């Protein structure tokens, strides 16, 4: 399957190895096809893992200041910090017990030293291919294929996460549900492909309207979108959404079937949860009710 809108990228490998001769041989083997970083100690490996992102780690077990099993355990237990890296052990510990241990700790492969260059290249290539497939699968699971923004599933996960974070950190959390006005008529008048294009423009407009790292936009379903604004009170959320609506109207997408305007507009309902009040279940419902109000009051507006 071809990856959409994604240029092939160079994969990054972290080599954790303390023997100069091994480093030289492995670097010679891999550095033309991959971006390679080298750590000679456990300390350096963990430091590099927490400051840059890698796709694969080739992990020696016997290191001057610790061992590879510990590194693997630490990475697997702290994925948020160290990322979704694949791990290949590469070691002279060749007992079945050690090999089984490495694999049970989360290693994807276990290579015995001395390493054969051809075998190493083949095994690394295989792990990178698996990594790529996982990446693609993750993308397909969480992103909407039409607009290339997060989908409903990703939204549900994010909302729950942000809800708990807002409680913990005692912050306000705003949620907006948006719905394109008279979109059925738009499809009827201009055709489904034009409708699809309109949805893409809507998504792109939201992407440029909400730029903070913590802002989260999603296609909620059909012609409905959702925006999660962390640490944002109702007044600010409404202001931001008004701006986004104005920018969208400014795109001037002709819509002769719209009763209110000659161009495409949207309506939005916003709800803000404060740490002490509200329950999670009411949250989405309230935003939905506000959206209904915006529609009832004439559309192309924000209610909250
Ligand atoms: P309102 O102003 O009350 O929101 O009216 P509306 O016509 O926008 O609402 P309605 O729910 O009647 O219609 C939504 C339309 O959105 C109907 C459906 O065909 C269209 N739609 C949903 N998903 C897609 C899509 O992926 N592509 C296109 N082109 N249209 C879609
Ligand atoms: Mg060693
Ligand atoms: Mg709708
Ligand atoms: Mg509807
Ligand atoms: Mg609609």
Image (cartoon, rainbow, N blue to C red):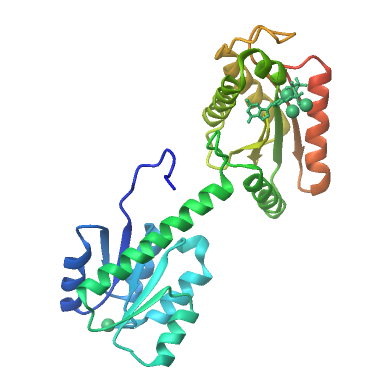
The structure residue drawn at horizontal position 22% and vertical position 64%, both measured from the top left corner, is 30
Q: Residue 145's quadrant in the figure?
A: top right
Q: Nearer the viewer, residue 90 or 294?
A: 90
Q: Is residue 289 above or below residue 29?
A: above
Q: Is residue 203 above or below residue 116?
A: above
The structure residue drawn at horizontal position 16% and vertical position 66%, both measured from the top left corner, is 28
**Does the rendering let one see residue 131?**
yes
* Horizontal relation, residue 63 to residue 80: left or right: left
Q: Nearer the viewer, residue 10 or 76?
A: 10
For ligand 4, which image quadrant applies? top right
Q: Residue 41's quadrant in the figure?
A: bottom left
* Horizontal relation, residue 227 to residue 304: left or right: left
The structure residue drawn at horizontal position 83% and vertical position 23%, both measured from the top left corner, is 293
Q: Position of residue 72 (x, y in %)?
A: 43, 75
Q: Position of residue 207 (x, y in %)?
A: 54, 31
Q: Nearer the viewer, residue 234 or 12?
A: 12
* Horizontal relation, residue 169 to residue 72: left or right: right
- Locate the C terminus and report the quarter of the image it occupies: top right
Q: Nearer the viewer, residue 165 or 53?
A: 53
Q: Position of residue 161 (x, y in %)?
A: 66, 52
Q: Is residue 140 above or below residue 127?
A: above
Q: Position of residue 172 (x, y in %)?
A: 71, 42
Q: Residue 298's quadrant in the figure?
A: top right
């Amino acid at each position: 399957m071809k990856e959409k809108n994604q240029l092939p990228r160079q994969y990054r490998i972290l080599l954790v190895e303390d023997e100069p001769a091994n480093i030289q041989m492995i670097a010679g083997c891999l550095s033309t096809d991959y971006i390679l970083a080298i750590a000679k100690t456990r300390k350096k490996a963990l430091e590099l893992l927490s400051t840059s992102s890698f796709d694969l780690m080739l992990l020696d077990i016997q290191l001057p200041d610790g061992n590879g099993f510990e590194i693997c355990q630490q990475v697997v237990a702290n994925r948020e910090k160290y990322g979704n890296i694949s791990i290949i052990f590469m070691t002279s510990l060749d007992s079945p017990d050690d090999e089984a241990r490495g694999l049970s700790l989360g290693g994807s492969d276990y290579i015995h030293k001395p390493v054969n260059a051809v075998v190493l290249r083949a095994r690394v290539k295989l792990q990178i291919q698996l990594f790529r497939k996982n990446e693609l699968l993750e993308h397909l699971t969480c992103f909407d294929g039409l607009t290339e923004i997060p989908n409903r599933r990703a939204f549900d996960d994010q909302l729950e996460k942000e809800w708990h974070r807002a409680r913990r950190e005692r912050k306000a959390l705003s949620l907006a549900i948006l719905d394109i006005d008279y979109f059925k008529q738009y499809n009827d008048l201009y055709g489904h492909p034009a409708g699809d294009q309109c949805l893409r423009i809507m998504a792109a407009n939201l992407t440029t309207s909400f730029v903070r790292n913590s802002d989260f936009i999603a296609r909620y379903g059909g012609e409905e979108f959702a925006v999660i604004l962390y640490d944002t009170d109702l007044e600010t959320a409404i202001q931001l959404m008004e701006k986004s609506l104005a920018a969208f109207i400014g795109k001037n997408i002709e819509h002769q079937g719209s009763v209110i305007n000659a161009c495409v507009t949207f309506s939005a309902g916003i709800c803000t949860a404060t740490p002490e009040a509200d329950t999670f279940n009411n949250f989405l419902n309230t935003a939905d009710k506000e959206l209904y109000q915006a529609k009832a009051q004439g559309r192309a507006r924000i209610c909250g």
